[in-house]
Image (cartoon, rainbow, N blue to C red):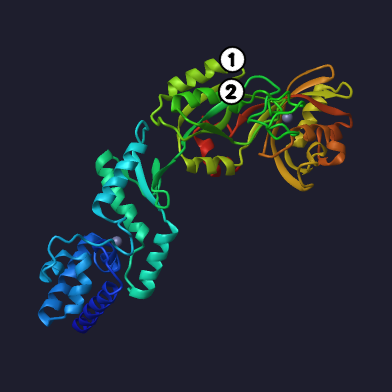
Amino acid sequence: MSEEIQENAKEDILQTARRIIGLGPICDSCLGRQFAMLSTGLTNLERGRSIKTVLAMQAASSGDMQLLEELAPSFRSARLKLGRIGEEDARCIVCLGEMRPENLVAWAEKANVALQGREYSTILVGTRMSGLLAENEELLLADGGSRHAEPFKSELNREVGKRLSAKTAKEVDLKNPDVIVHLNLEKGEVELQIASLFIRGRYKKLIRGIPQTRWPCRECHGRGCPRCGGTGRMYQESVDELIRPAVMEAALAEDTVFHGAGREDIDARMLGTGRPFIVEAVRPRVRSIDLAELQKAINEETDGKVEILQLEKADIAMVERLKEAAFVKTYSALVALGSEISEEKLKLVLKELVGSIDQRTPTRVTHRRADKLRVRKVYSADLIEISGNSARINIRGDSGLYIKELISGDGGRTKPSLSEALNVDAVVVELDVMDVGGESDGTSSWNAKEDQR
Ligand SMILES: [Zn+2]
Ligand SMILES: [Zn+2]
């Protein structure tokens, strides 16, 4: 049985190859690529050369002059048989010369030049096809009829990748390369896609009144207007912008993007163990950074406004986890009460707040968020100190729990609330975040599962 199938397959390949040769001059690579899926351990160039060799010998033995004539423009051995000496290969009608070995070397050299002055350890080559070559490839598949072809792009990526890897002594990485080199066939240019560099850590925000990230002006959306004094932003500083210059300088990056594990209110400090964050250096030239040095530089530059802890290398997958993680948080709230309350009563009432809380979207954010009822948990509510009408309370609760409303009741939109339970007004005067992600030392906060208590 297998002999019969092999016989058919062999016949099929040579018939298909002959049909393809009849379409016009085709280089060894483009011919071999039509049968790439049938064998391994060979380049398409070797496959194509082998097929042409067999066809030329068949033509010679059977006196098939037409086949020899068709082979001649792209096969030197056929030309010699026909006495056509000193004639060069004709241009391939499929790749238009793109697959010529010297052209592959030229692409690798172009990429190597573009990569100069940039630190990277892994690469991948990609191809941006031109319309003309894409059309040629389609026509070849339609008119040639091979069912075993490999895409043009795959071969070019692989062949240039091999040569570039040899030239630069850097590994090819199919999944997470530091650099993707795109060969733009339309423009004949190399375009570099540089993977961002990710650094994780925790930040403390030691002052009130600054947001976590850059905040474009509501009026002008960043262009600059009278309202923002031409700066284009609502706030002149942010945690993001305070740490940015040192990161830009260390990585020689073109920009940074700040990813926080949630965010505190602008008027809340972030104290205690700090909040997990990841800073992304965009198009970095340097990838091996002394993180202890960077941390020191950031903490010097932020001028006591922000403090960075525990800088470590991160990756893009951690950004996803950071965004998805539902962190348990501990807050410290300074609360003003409508009248004096005894310590015993306040302690008793705080115990009642532990458990499930029904919160409608707070009045203060309904203009930008849909009005929904959410159920969040309070894990603990402890009185730290009380003096007259003023009490400091530590609250540990689910991610997304609105603390100001838990205290005030927000006109009955949060139930239960401290105000309702005491039957007096209660307002948060100052709010600080003390911990994000539990008592962890920072490591477990990166695992979303562990934080979902
Ligand atoms: Zn070709
Ligand atoms: Zn503005």
Residue 188 drawn at (x, y percent)? 38, 48
Q: Amino acid at mark 1?
A: Asp
Q: Is residue 301 above or below residue 76?
A: above
Q: Amino acid at mark 2?
A: Leu
Quadrant of ligand 1 in image: bottom left
Q: Mark 2 or mark 1, which is nearer the start of the sequence?
A: 2
Q: Residues within 10 Å of mark 1 (few under 14, many from 20)?
A: few
Query: Is residue 68 in sight in this rendering?
Result: yes
Secondary structure of the residue carrying tag 1 is loop
Q: Residues within 10 Å of mark 2 (few under 14, many from 20)?
A: many
In this rendering, position of residue 223 left or right of residue 58: right
The label on residue 29 is none
In this rendering, position of residue 294 left or right of residue 82: right
Residue 159 drawn at (x, y percent)? 28, 53
Compare residues 267 and 218 and report the one nearer the observer.
218
The label on residue 303 is 1
Residue appearing at x 83%, y 41% in the figure? 413
> Mark 1 CB in 8 Å range of ligand 2?
no
Residue 325 drawn at (x, y percent)? 58, 42
The label on residue 242 is 2
Pointer 1 with pointer 2, Cβ within 8 A: yes
Secondary structure of the residue carrying tag 2 is helix
Residue appearing at x 15%, y 69% in the figure? 78
Q: Is residue 414 above or below residue 271?
A: below
Compare residues 13 and 370 and report the one nearer the observer.
13
Query: Is residue 273 in sight in this rendering?
Result: no
In this rendering, position of residue 319 left or right of residue 79: right
In this rendering, position of residue 360 left or right of residue 116: right
Residue appearing at x 73%, y 23% in the figure? 229
